[in-house]
Amino acid sequence: MRSLTLALLAAFVTLTAVAQTDPLRAAPADKAFAKLRGITQFYIDVTTSENRGEDADLRGEIRDGMELELRRANLTPKSVEGLSPEAATPLLLIEVRFDRGLGRYTADVNLSVRDNATISRNKEAVLAQSYGETRRALGTSDTALNREVKARSRELVLEIIEGMKRLK
């Protein structure tokens, strides 16, 4: 009994010594947000794969939700309208790709951040995607799908805000 206790104690001491000497590394999730350090403003844009009248309303509602969450996090949202892609950086973009069919209502909601890269190709600056995340929305009707798309969009924006707050 005593030898078992000593063996467990020795294993515990060895493991704690290794854990203390191993330097702390950033979690993989934090590495994704490291490229966003220091950003205080975002140009925001929402695109959809279909250009229906109902989708214009959906884009507006998603854009309003993004703007609200950014303002709550003390990030300045700016409109991208009338600007070139190079001038509208960093760009927080939500793309919604619908897949509607007979009894099928799904959409992929993709959030990406595009920023100017320091790499140059053919002597020109390049816009690079510094962050990207995708979620799938499922619904039983157009109304339910739109509600799910808005919820997934909000989740993605909140996730990026929380990741940026962890780095501060």
Image (spheres, rainbow, N blue to C red):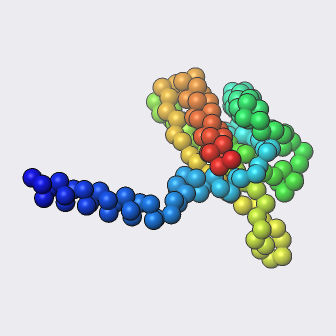
Spot occupied by residue 72 in the image (x, y as percentages of width and height): 73, 30
Spot occupied by residue 66 in the image (x, y as percentages of width and height): 71, 34
Judged left or right of residue 153, residue 15 is left
Looking at the image, which is closer to me, 100 or 72?
72
Spot occupied by residue 135 in the image (x, y as percentages of width and height): 54, 42
Task: Name the residue located 46 percent from the left edge and 30 percent from the top edge.
Answer: 103
Task: Name the residue located 72 percent from the left edge and 35 percent from the top edge.
Answer: 73
* Residue sticking out furthest to the front: 2
Judged left or right of residue 109, residue 130 is right
Q: Please determine whether, in this image, residue 142 is positioned above or below residue 132.
A: above
* Residue sticking out furthest to the bottom: 122
Asked which quadrant contains residue 97, the reply is top right
Spot occupied by residue 80 in the image (x, y as percentages of width and height): 84, 43
* Residue sticking out furthest to the left: 1
Looking at the image, which is closer to me, 12 or 119?
12
Q: Is residue 95 visible?
A: no
Judged left or right of residue 12, residue 120 is right
Looking at the image, which is closer to me, 78 or 150?
78
Q: Please determine whether, in this image, residue 151 is positioned above or below residue 120.
A: above
Asked which quadrant contains residue 41, the reply is top right
